[in-house]
């Protein structure tokens, strides 16, 4: 048997509580931040995360499209970046161990717990790809201002636009910090050494931890650039105030001489 898994970043977030209340299907497992469905009658599996990711297993294009249209009703700030990741699970009853490769794995038997672990890691990988795209955009923007400083010795960006840029950076960082739990191991691996090993192998396969460290490093670079831009802007504002004061003093002197 072969099962194809596809994870997609649909939005910045989902309202999981409202979704669970209105999606008329029995939950296999879940929490306030995620929900996993095992639709055994159709051999389909579904995993939804509150950080805006949906993971399908064994869904045909029509069923997938229908569900996406439904779940968008619970989405906040839909993402239009076409971010997705695929993974395939094959079963081979003659195997006595699990083989994990770059984009597929072979196991002796497929069950709901195993599928949940694979779908979880595939979903985490897509979420990291989304945040990587956001930080890349921020770094590209900051490079433009750094180049302007190098070539012209000044920043042409207005105070309002700089504040908007700072707000965008902080919003991305807060979103990542809020979703730090995506790196946590699920409870079901704690008492199952086989699933625990599978989870670690998948995290290594998707480079989950190194990618997150790289993401944190790049955000730090952006924050350092923000500090520089803010200092430059403060100096510019100080010079402007100094000139205003000089002009006012000069005006008062002229008025005093005129009166006398």
Image: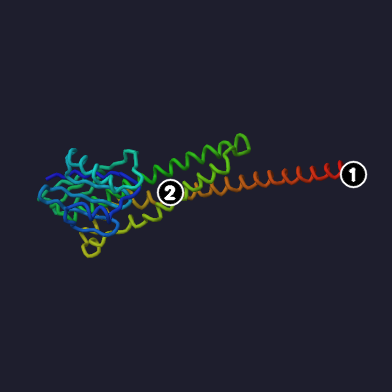
Q: Residues within 10 Å of mark 2 (few under 14, many from 20)?
A: some
Number of numbered discs on residues:
2
Quadrant location of the C terminus? Answer: top right
Residue found farthest to the top? 151
Decide: few, some or many residues near mark 1? Use Cα within 10 Å; few <14, some 14-19, many ≥20. Answer: few
Question: Mark 1 vs mark 2: which is more N-terminal?
Answer: 2
Residue at 28% across, 52% down: 49
Secondary structure at numbered mark 2:
helix
Q: Is residue 33 visible?
A: yes
Disc number for residue 120: none
Q: Which mark is residue 172?
A: 2
3D distance between C-alphas at marks 1 and 2: 61 Å
Seen in the image, is 202 located left or right of residue 141? left
Colour mode of the rendering? rainbow
Q: Is residue 218 left or right of residue 232?
A: left
**What is the x, y in percent for residue 91?**
13, 48
Where is residue 103? Give x, y as percent. Answer: 24, 43
**In the image shown, does 14 or 118 lie closer to the viewer?**
14
Residue at figure coordinates x 20%, y 51% from the top left:
23
Which mark's residue is nearer the viewer, 1 or 2? Answer: 1
- Residue most extreme to the front: 259
**Residue 128 locus on image (x, y percent):** 35, 47
Q: Which residue is mark 1?
A: 260
Q: Position of residue 182 (x, y in %)?
A: 33, 55
Q: Residue furthest right?
A: 260
Residue ID at (20%, 49%): 46
Q: Quadrant of the N terminus?
A: top left
Whether residue 205 is visible to the viewer of this picture, yes or no, is no
Q: Considering the numbered disc 1 on the image, is that residue within a helix, a strand or a loop?
A: loop
Is there CB contact under 8 Å for labels 1 and 2?
A: no
Q: Nearer the viewer, residue 234 or 203?
A: 234
């Amino acid at each position: 048997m072969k099962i194809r898994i596809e994870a997609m970043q649909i939005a910045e977030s989902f309202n999981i509580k409202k979704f669970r209340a209105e999606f008329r299907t029995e939950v296999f497992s879940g929490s306030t931040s995620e929900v996993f469905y095992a639709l055994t009658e159709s051999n389909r599996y579904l995993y939804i995360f509150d950080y805006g990711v949906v993971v399908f297993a064994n869904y045909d294009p029509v069923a997938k499209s229908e569900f996406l249209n439904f779940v968008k009703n619970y989405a906040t700030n839909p993402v239009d970046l076409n971010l997705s990741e695929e993974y395939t699970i094959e079963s081979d009853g003659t195997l006595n161990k699990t083989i994990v490769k770059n984009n597929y794995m072979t196991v002796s038997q497929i069950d709901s717990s195993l599928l949940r672990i694979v779908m979880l890691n595939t979903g985490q990988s897509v979420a990291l790809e989304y945040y990587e795209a956001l930080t890349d955009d921020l770094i590209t923007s900051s490079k433009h201002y750094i180049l302007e400083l190098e070539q012209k010795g000044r920043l042409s960006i207005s105070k309002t636009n700089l504040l908007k840029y700072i707000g965008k950076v902080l919003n991305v960082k807060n979103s990542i910090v809020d979703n730090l739990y995506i790196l946590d191991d699920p409870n079901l691996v704690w008492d199952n050494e086989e699933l625990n090993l599978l989870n670690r192998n998948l995290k290594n396969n998707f480079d989950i931890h190194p990618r997150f460290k790289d993401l944190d490093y790049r955000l730090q670079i952006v924050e350092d650039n923000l500090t520089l831009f803010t200092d430059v802007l403060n100096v510019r504002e100080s010079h402007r105030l100094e000139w205003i004061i000089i002009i006012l003093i000069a005006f008062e002197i002229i008025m005093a001489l005129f009166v006398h």
